[in-house]
Amino acid sequence: MPFYLLLLDWLEKLTDEYTWILELPNTAKNKTFQEINESVRNAYELYYSFSPPKADAGGWKTHEWSRTWRKRPAATAIELHLHNVARQLNSLYGIIFILKHRPTKD
């Protein structure tokens, strides 16, 4: 039960970031924003059709986005919000993994 509450909490945090991102100009044209939208969609699909390799790939991709923006000396407003979304998505992938992964018996 606690992990489901955590999942809902992260989803709520994501909606907050999306609210702020969508208020920024030219958001829809931002290529990274479109890629992150795909990653959100992949997390949704992963929850309903779990695959450990897909969970790992999604977690790694969001981790890499987060590292890329953290290294930049001066970020734009959208980059700051996308960095937050990437971090939150990374946690979301981890929570989905915890909830859905069923280890195989050796």
Image: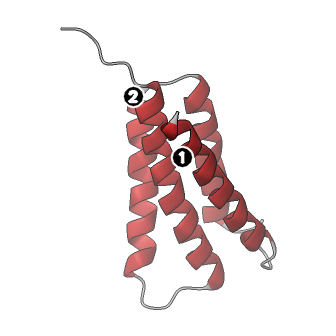
**Amino acid under label 2?**
Pro
Q: Quadrant of residue 81?
A: bottom right
94, above or below 45, in the image: below
User: Which of the image's four quarters has the C terminus?
Assistant: top left
Q: Report the residue at 39% width, 28% height from top.
A: 52
Q: Report the residue at 45% width, 75% height from top.
A: 69
58, above or below 17, in the image: above
Give the numbered dot on residue 37: none
In terms of secondary structure, where does tag 1 sit? Answer: helix
User: Which residue is tagged 1?
Assistant: 6
Q: Position of residue 28 (x, y in %)?
A: 78, 65
> Alpha carbon of mark 1 to alpha carbon of mark 2: how far?
20 Å
> Between disc 1 and disc 2, whose residue precedes?
1
Q: Quadrant of residue 103?
A: top left
9 or 42: which is nearer to us? 9
Q: How many marks?
A: 2
Q: Residue furthest top?
A: 106
User: Which residue is tagged 2?
Assistant: 52
Label 1 CA crowd tier, 10 Å (few <14, some 14–19, many 20+): some
Q: Residue furthest front?
A: 1
Q: Residue furthest bottom?
A: 74
Q: Report the residue at 46% width, 51% height from top.
A: 91
Q: Position of residue 14 (x, y in %)?
A: 65, 58
User: Horizontally, is 45 left or right of 1 in the view?
Assistant: right
Q: Position of residue 60 (x, y in %)?
A: 38, 49
Q: Position of residue 1 (x, y in %)?
A: 53, 33
Q: Report the residue at 71% width, 58% height from top.
A: 15
8, above or below 16, in the image: above
In terms of secondary structure, where does tag 2 sit? Answer: helix
User: Horizontally, is 81 left or right of 70 in the view?
Assistant: right
**Amino acid under label 1?**
Leu
Label 2 CA crowd tier, 10 Å (few <14, some 14–19, many 20+): some
